[in-house]
Image (tube, rainbow, N blue to C red):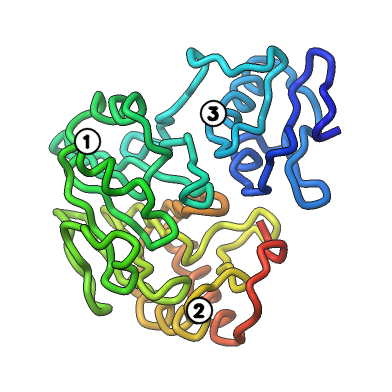
């Protein structure tokens, strides 16, 4: 079903890399079968059609194909408002492992980009239209590919931690050590070594946590999880990062690079992080295995 052309129907073609992006945006319509995304059923009504268009425009390999075969740019929903402060950028890039990226609006009318979508001048113009972008915040090396181009086009400062600096050696601001750094009023960078040596969390307004690949919301477990099967640096360091910071992480929105987004009351998130810290402490190093991630 996944790569057969359905008459007048949506489909997923053979380029799918099983990145999970489409399943986040069109749950129940697109699912995972045999290690890749498939269309589970055709849409019913305009809301489900909009969900599939969002999935198609976010898919990094453009594998989600509409009945007409070509995507209609007029139906591109990105950047997509998640609330009155944060936008999901969409247009995920194969050069950032298909990661999600976000635009964080600030009270003074400016914005910050957290990780980046694929690069294009037309996409950059969309973000400029929402207001000046002052900073591009990179959570870690895997998501650094387009950072410099967006920063230069937007006139923004590029941030990255020293542990991953070889991925963007021309960063304008280099985070160092493990102490928090104030990026701007209400916005903190918290170094979080584990997934990579230079992984960073960005916290905004004690409401939003941009977690990169340090932890994410799993639909499978209905909880916050770490991707211990895809930890490039050290699972023990990731456990130490959680132990060092979990008690001071206050947020409602969990906004990861990979895995689902979730909004819960602050106290609920805090309790889940405490339990995650305890679980992660018991984990041991294992070979990298993308197929073991519990999306």
Mark 2–mark 3 Cα distance, whole angstroms, equals 35 Å
User: Which labelled disc corresponds to residue 277?
Assistant: 2
Question: What x and y, as percent, mark residue 234?
Answer: 49, 81
Judged left or right of residue 70, residue 102 is left
Percent coordinates x, y for residue 134 in the rendering: 17, 43
Task: Kindly check if marks 2 and 3 are in contact, taking CB atoms under 8 A apart as contact.
Answer: no
- Closer mark to the observer between disc 3 and disc 1: 1
Q: Nearer the viewer, residue 86 or 291?
A: 291
Judge left or right: residue 24 versus residue 107: right
Crowding near the residue tagged with mark 3, few <14, some 14–19, many ≥20 C-alpha atoms within 10 Å: many
Q: Determine which residue is flagged by label 3.
A: 57
Of residues 101 and 168, the one drawn nearer to the viewer in this rendering: 168
Count residues near mark 1 (Cα–Cα under 10 Å), then give few for <14, some for 14-19, many for 20+.
Answer: few
Check the image and report above or below for 233 versus 72. Answer: below
Relative depth, front residue between 234 and 84: 234
- Marks 2 and 3: which is nearer the front? 3
Q: Could you tell me residue 12's position as x and y percent?
A: 73, 32
Please state the total of marks drawn on the protein image: 3
- At label 2, counting other C-alpha atoms closer than 10 Å, the crowd grade (few under 14, some 14-19, many 20 or more) is many
Residue beneath the point at 58% across and 18% down: 71
52 over 251 or under it: above or below: above
Q: Secondary structure under badge 1?
A: helix
Spatial separation of the CA atoms under disc 3 and disc 1: 22 Å
């Amino acid at each position: 079903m996944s790569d057969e052309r359905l008459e007048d129907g949506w489909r997923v073609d053979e380029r799918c890399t099983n990145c999970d992006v489409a399943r986040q945006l069109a749950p129940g319509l697109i699912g995972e079968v045999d290690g890749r995304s498939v269309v589970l059923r055709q849409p019913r009504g305009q809301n489900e059609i909009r969900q599939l268009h969002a999935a198609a425009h976010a898919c990094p390999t453009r594998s989600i194909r509409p009945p007409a075969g070509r995507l209609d740019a007029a139906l591109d929903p990105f950047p997509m408002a998640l609330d009155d402060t944060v936008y999901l950028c969409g247009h995920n890039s194969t050069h950032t492992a298909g990661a999600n990226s976000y635009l964080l609006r600030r009270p003074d009318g400016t914005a910050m980009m957290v990780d980046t979508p694929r690069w294009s001048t037309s996409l950059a113009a969309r973000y400029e239209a929402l207001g000046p972008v002052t900073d591009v915040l990179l959570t870690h090396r895997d998501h650094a590919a387009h950072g410099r181009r967006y920063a230069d086009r937007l006139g923004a400062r590029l941030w990255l931690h020293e542990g991953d600096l070889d991925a963007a050696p021309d960063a304008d601001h280099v985070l160092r050590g493990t102490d928090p750094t104030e990026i701007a009023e209400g916005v903190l960078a918290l170094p979080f070594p584990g997934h990579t040596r230079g992984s960073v969390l960005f916290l905004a307004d004690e409401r939003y946590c941009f977690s990169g690949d340090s932890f994410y919301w799993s639909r499978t477990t209905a909880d916050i999880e770490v991707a211990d099967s895809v930890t490039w640096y050290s699972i023990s360091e990731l456990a130490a990062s959680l132990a060092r910071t979990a008690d001071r992480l206050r947020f409602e929105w969990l906004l990861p690079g990979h895995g689902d987004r979730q909004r819960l009351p602050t106290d609920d998130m805090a309790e889940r992080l405490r339990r995650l810290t305890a679980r992660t402490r018991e984990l041991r190093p294992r070979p990298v295995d993308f197929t073991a991630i519990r999306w």
